Structure formats: structure tokens, C-alpha cells
Image (tube, grey):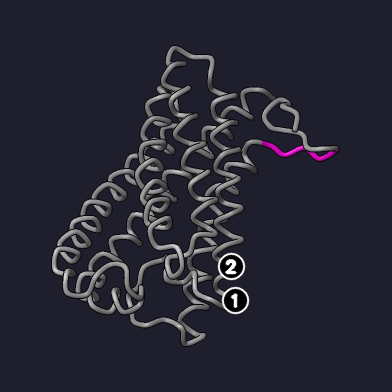
Amino acid sequence: MENITNGIKIGSREIQDTTIARMGWLIPTITVPLAMTIHIFSGNSRDFPFFISESDYPGLERWVFTIGFFCAGLVQMLFAYRMWHSFNNGERRKLMHLTLGCGLFTGANLVVMSFANMYDYLSIHVLTASNVFEFGMLWALLAHLSLPKANSSGRKIRIAGMWIALVSFVIMSQSIIRAIKDLEEFGLEGDTIITLNSIQSAVDIAAYAEYGLFLGLILALYSFESDFRDKLKQSQ
């Protein structure tokens, strides 16, 4: 891989930063609804609403989930690197270094999560998924703060997305925490489906909050595309 102006070169193929930025939000935006839709219409969903990761179920939906999030994780790491490389020349260089670290960590956890399904590797899945959500929000915030001269419309979308993600994350977390307190009689080391069925009343709230969290993060990712478009115009 070779850095070029406003992008990278892999072999003889050049990929612009705007394309990388678009892939960063487009791949998960396609992956999640597609995997969930297949999970529902294949008759594998145990209830609705359900957590996004429940669609990582044996069958076609698992292929969509795993391949989609694996690619999304790799692109996220590349996106974080290109943002660092492209905008690491201002007054907030130290903050941009920290942003890069968060972006790489988020992408790496997304890659691991894509293979660690919640049915067979619940502990690993919960850990990596939590890291993706938490460090994903932190990455978006740090990247936002690292770009004081960012595109104005992109900033508005990003701020809205971060607020949606934060509020949704609090609601989701509190719903799950309260439900788990009542799970001593069921246990967390048993069958995942039985456990989820036992706390479905909490999932009814937490799942919708997770959808909101996902939407907020997608909006934040989408917002950075405008900054790369501005940079491309300035270089032309």
C-alpha cells in the first residue's frame, strides 16, 4: 500500500479518501439491515425486537454478518489511518494521534467481533461489541475535536449523530444492567437464547436503543466524508 495525494495506491489501483470514507459508513449500513432481514424471513429470529448481533446466526445471515463486519473493521482502520495522515498537520496533532489509536482499536475489535458470535463466544462478543460502541463514540468525538475547520454541514450531522449515539448507549446500557440484576436464577453461562428470552422485556427497550446507537455512529461516520471532499476540492 502506498500513500498518494488524497488516497492510497494498492498495486496499480488508486483509491481516493472519499471512497474510503464512503465505504466506512456504507458497508455497515448495508450489512446490518440485510443480516437482520434474512434472520427474520428465514424464521430464525426468536422474537422482535432483537439485538443486531442475534442475526449472526448459523445460516446465510451469518455469512452476511461476518463478511460485512470483517470488511467494515478493516475499512475503519484504513479510514482512521487516512484521516490521521490527511489532517495531521494542524495545531491538534497530539489529539489526532490519540484519534488514530481509538480508530485502529475500534476497527480491530470489529474484526474480532465479526467472528466471535454471541451464541458460541458470548464473553468475547460482549467485550468486543462494547469496545466497538464505546471506542467508536470516543473516536468520533476525538476526530470531531481534531478538525476545528471541518465542513459546517458535516459538523452538524456529526454532533447530531454523537448525541443520538450517547443517549441510545445510556438507555441500552441501563436496560441491560437492570435486567441482568434479575438473572441470578437463570445464569449468564447457559444457553444464550434462553437467557435472551428471559430478559425480553428489557430487550424490547435495549434493542431499539441499540438501533439508535448504530444509527448515531453511522451518521458520525458519514459526516467525515464531507471533510475529505473539501480537502479534495482544495487540492485540485
Residue shown at 47% from the left, 87% from the top: 43
Residue shown at 25% from the left, 58% from the top: 172
Q: What is the magenta segment's predominant secondary structure?
A: strand
Residue 186 in which image quadrant: bottom left
Location of residue 148 in the rendering, given as x and y in whole percent from the top left corner: 40, 22
Location of residue 15 in the rendering, given as x and y in whole percent from the top left corner: 72, 39
Q: Nearer the viewer, residue 175 or 191?
A: 191
Q: What crowding class fits label 2: few (fewer than 14 Cα within 10 Å), some (14-19), or many (20 or more)?
A: many
Residue shown at 40% from the left, 31% from the top: 144
Residue 228 in which image quadrant: top right
Which amino acid type is marked by label 1? Leu
Taking the magenta stretch, the answer to whether it contains residue 220 is: no
Q: Nearer the viewer, residue 200 or 119?
A: 119
Residue 137 in which image quadrant: top left
The stretch of residues the image draws in magenta is 12-16
Q: CA distance from mark 2 to mark 1?
A: 7 Å
Give the number of the disc on residue 64. Answer: 2
Q: Is residue 57 above or below residue 147?
A: below
Answer with left or right where residue 167 lies relative to residue 96. left
SS at mark 1 in the image: helix
Which amino acid type is marked by label 2? Val
Answer with left or right where residue 151 lies relative to residue 12. left
The residue that mark 1 highlights is 60
Q: What crowding class fits label 1: few (fewer than 14 Cα within 10 Å), some (14-19), or many (20 or more)?
A: some
Dots 2, 1 in contact, CB < 8 A = yes
Q: Nearer the viewer, residue 34 or 203?
A: 203
Residue shown at 55% from the left, 43% from the top: 76
Residue furthest to the bottom in view is: 43
Q: Is residue 31 above or below residue 165?
A: below
Q: Is residue 127 above or below residue 119?
A: above
SS at mark 2 in the image: helix
Location of residue 166 in the rendering, given as x and y in whole percent from the top left corner: 27, 47
